[in-house]
Amino acid sequence: MRAVTWQGKRDVRVETVPDPRIEEPTDAVIKVTSSGLCGSDLHLYEVLTPFMTPGDILGHEPMGIVEEVGAGVPHLKPGDRVVVPFQIACGHCWMCTSGLPTQCETTQVTEEGMGAALFGYTRLYGAVPGGQAEYLRVPQAQFGPIKVPEGPADDRFLYLSDVLPTAWQAVEYAAVPPGGSVAVLGLGPIGDMSCRIALHRGAAQVIGVDLVPERLQRARERGVEVFDLNAFDKQGELVDAIRERTAGRGPDAVIDAVGTEAHGSPVARTQQNAAGLLPKAWAARLHQKMGADRLAALYLAIDLVRRGGTISLSGVYGGAADPLPMLTLFDKQVQLRMGQANVRRWVDDILPLLTDDDPLGVDGFATHHVPLTDAPHAYKMFQQKQDGAVKVVMHP
Ligand SMILES: NC(=O)c1ccc[n+]([C@@H]2O[C@H](COP(=O)([O-])OP(=O)(O)OC[C@H]3O[C@@H](n4cnc5c(N)ncnc54)[C@H](O)[C@@H]3O)[C@@H](O)[C@H]2O)c1
Ligand SMILES: [Zn+2]
Ligand SMILES: [Zn+2]
């Protein structure tokens, strides 16, 4: 089959690889019809390269048609239409039954000290072949895949794999009080959808911050009060401007939908780039012992949130030695919640919103639909924010 493979820093290629097959009774194989490109894929493209192996198949936002199932997957049959969550979880361990499938005790990557395995996401997360491919082997298929109805185009359901539950969890963890305010940093797919969900769930004031004009515009059109990072010389000026709009206190909650590659973090950027030049084993060790994120967005969140407010991190962070302003965090009595999205936990809340009247605007959410064979261009376009790309969906 054809699959998008990682070959090196900023080098992905579509290659012919062996077809996946059923290996365990709890496996399914699906024929992929749509596969999203995510901000998380961009971290692999550029920063997390020490944990990748050339040839790794990328992608963790797939949906498609069941091709084959193992004997241990009674609820699925060939021909079923399914969306596959980005994390692999068993559904029956203590963590899964506690609503934390990202911490699944059956699939935890214990050799690396990490949580549940993820599709297409480095050896830290189990080096599981991903879903930007014609076919995907889905382990633990007795729990993961979500059956969806026939009829609407894939885009209606595709974002159940990641964007929707991630944004839903971001808003849930933000705990915006009734009539309250939330600022969302980063208006990529996750931040944009977090704004939509916050508005839908009744936040009285939703503020968005980014620096890409068409991303700001997209959010503005849906009723978000947007601030362009580029319009401010210093972080303090932006914070003052937003405080002025939030009764002088700052928003009740801040969602960081940027993560480790935040624009405006020169020191860590140099370190991340330097690590990329080292031999692979050294770079991995450096990253695990001394790695630092580009923390501009997190610092902004800490500064911005009102005293006693909540910061919800959905942007991915991976640093082992990040300097944090504990004085400010402690003194402001900030509540901090974070993590990969527990996909299945939120699906029942989200599915009723995926209807013809489309309150979250999923049908028109993608800016680009491209053939899988265009993946090298799609990665570049999405990373460099060319051609108005916000959400790119690939089709094998
Ligand atoms: N927690 C999860 O389960 C989960 C799931 C999916 C994605 N993510 C993470 O969420 C983050 C966003 O993903 P995405 O797909 O929306 O990616 P994206 O890269 O398209 O979005 C990031 C946005 O942040 C903006 N930005 C950069 N620096 C900024 C700054 N200093 N202040 C404000 N905005 C800034 C960028 O212009 C961009 O629009 C990534 O870190 C991704 O890895 C987490
Ligand atoms: Zn994703
Ligand atoms: Zn489990």
Image (spheres, rainbow, N blue to C red):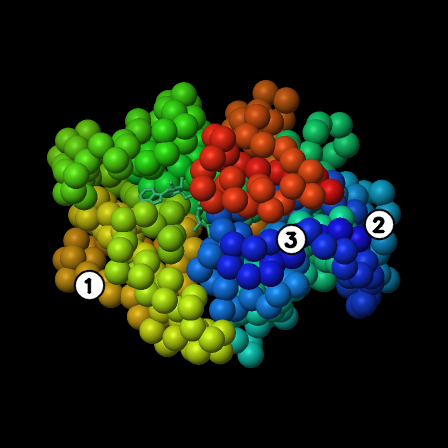
Residue receiving disc 3: 13
Answer whether labels 1 and 2 touch (C-beta < 8 Å): no
Q: Are marks 3 and 2 in contact (CB under 8 Å)?
A: no
Q: Residue at x 36, y 29 (%)?
A: 213
One can see residue 203 in this view: no
Dividing the picture into quarters, in which one does residue 285 lie? bottom left
The residue wearing badge 1 is: 326
Using a 10 Å C-alpha cutoff, classify the residue at mark 1 as few (fewer than 14 neighbours), some (14 to 19) or many (20 or more): few
> Where's residue 11, x and y in %?
56, 55
Residue 235, compared with residue 214, is above or below; it is below
**Between 37 and 159, the one nearer to me in the picture:** 37
Position in image of residue 152 (x %, y %): 71, 27
- In the image, what residue occupies the spot 53% across and 36% down? 391
Earlier-in-chain disc, 3 versus 2: 3
Q: Which quadrant would residue 230 be assigned to in this image?
A: top left
Tell me: residue 185, above or below residue 354. Answer: below
